[in-house]
Image (cartoon, rainbow, N blue to C red):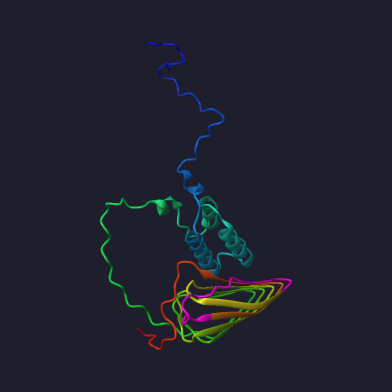
């Protein structure tokens, strides 16, 4: 038996320090932050940032900067700091990566709750030196106008009830921004102009020929307009009059 000092450590002595090329992991962290994030993860963070902006917790510039960082993030570690200082921060992301074992019993089916009535909204949204947001279950008519002057407008159509097979959103952004989200199963088209600004519409064509069409038009002057589908959100109600059920 080899009792040399290299193989046996005297009792009462602290363990040998780690080598310089083996840094100690930070307390409470693991490798989850290095894993790749999916579109759904980026959208989840973007939703939290939109809520914070609507509540006045973020300025227009902070909201725009963090939204851009969220959609450009590649890993969970890049997403988590974007909401760390917000009350709605979801906490460590590693719980989202755990999956039940294959032999785990399936969860009991839950009874679907009746949807609340869709609310009626004005066809015009205006944000001047401030913000305006519209989301949730609301009625979307055939025409909507969004005006942002030194402010921001957010339009979320993912849970809305479409009353028309075609929705035209007219955008005017002057030193401001307009952000539009649509369900992933509608057709999205755009024909706007960016003047010392940006007018970005991520067009798509729905495989369903009867799906609603959302058309974005207008101009952004020293400002921006962004419209894109929200992955994982599908429109279930359109061109229906039974809005109360």
Numbered disc total: 0
Q: Quadrant of the C terminus?
A: bottom left
- Quadrant housing residue 218: bottom right
Where in the figure is residue 166, as x and y percent of width and height?
52, 85
Where in the figure is residue 99, as x and y percent of width and height?
36, 52
Residue that appears at 48% across and 75% down: 207
Above or below, 91 against 213 in this view is: above
Q: Residue furthest bottom?
A: 241
In the rendered structure, the answer to whether residue 114 lies left or right of residue 57 reads left
* Residue 211 is one of the magenta-drawn residues: yes
Residue that appears at 56% across and 59% down: 70
In the rendered structure, the answer to whether residue 194 lies left or right of residue 205 reads right
Q: Nearer the viewer, residue 27 or 32?
A: 32
Residue that appears at 52% across and 58% down: 83
> Magenta segment range?
195-213
Q: Residue furthest right?
A: 196
Where in the figure is residue 51, as x and y percent of width and height?
51, 67
- Quadrant housing residue 9: top left
Where in the figure is residue 36, as x and y percent of width and height?
50, 52
In the rendered structure, the answer to whether residue 26 lies left or right of residue 150 reads left
Q: Nearer the viewer, residue 109 or 86?
A: 109
Above or below, 161 against 98 in this view is: below
* Residue 154 is one of the magenta-drawn residues: no
Above or below, 163 against 89 in this view is: below
Residue that appears at 36% across and 78% down: 115
Above or below, 51 against 238 in this view is: above
């Amino acid at each position: 038996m080899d009792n040399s000092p290299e193989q046996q450590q005297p009792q009462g002595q602290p363990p040998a320090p780690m080598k310089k090329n083996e840094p100690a992991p930070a307390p409470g962290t693991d490798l989850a932050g290095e894993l790749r994030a999916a579109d759904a993860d980026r959208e989840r963070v973007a939703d939290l940032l939109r809520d914070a902006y609507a509540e006045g917790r973020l300025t227009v510039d902070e909201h725009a900067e963090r939204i851009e960082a969220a959609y450009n993030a590649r890993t969970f570690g890049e997403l988590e700091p974007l909401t760390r200082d917000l009350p709605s921060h979801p906490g460590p992301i590693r719980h989202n990566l755990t999956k039940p074992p294959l032999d785990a019993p399936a969860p009991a089916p839950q009874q679907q709750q009746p949807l609340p009535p869709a609310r009626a909204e004005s066809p015009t949204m205006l944000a001047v030196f401030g913000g305006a947001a519209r989301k949730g279950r609301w009625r979307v008519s055939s025409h909507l106008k969004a005006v942002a002057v030194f402010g921001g407008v957010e339009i979320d159509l993912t849970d809305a009830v479409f009353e028309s097979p075609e929705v035209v959103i007219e955008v005017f952004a002057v030193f401001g921004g307009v952000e539009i989200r649509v369900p992933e199963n509608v057709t999205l088209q755009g024909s706007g102009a960016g003047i010392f600004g940006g007018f970005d519409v991520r067009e798509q064509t729905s495989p369903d020929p009867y799906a609603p069409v959302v058309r974005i038009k207008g101009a952004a002057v020293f400002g921006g307009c962004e419209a894109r589908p929200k992955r994982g959100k599908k429109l279930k109600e359109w061109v229906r009059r039974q809005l109360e059920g």
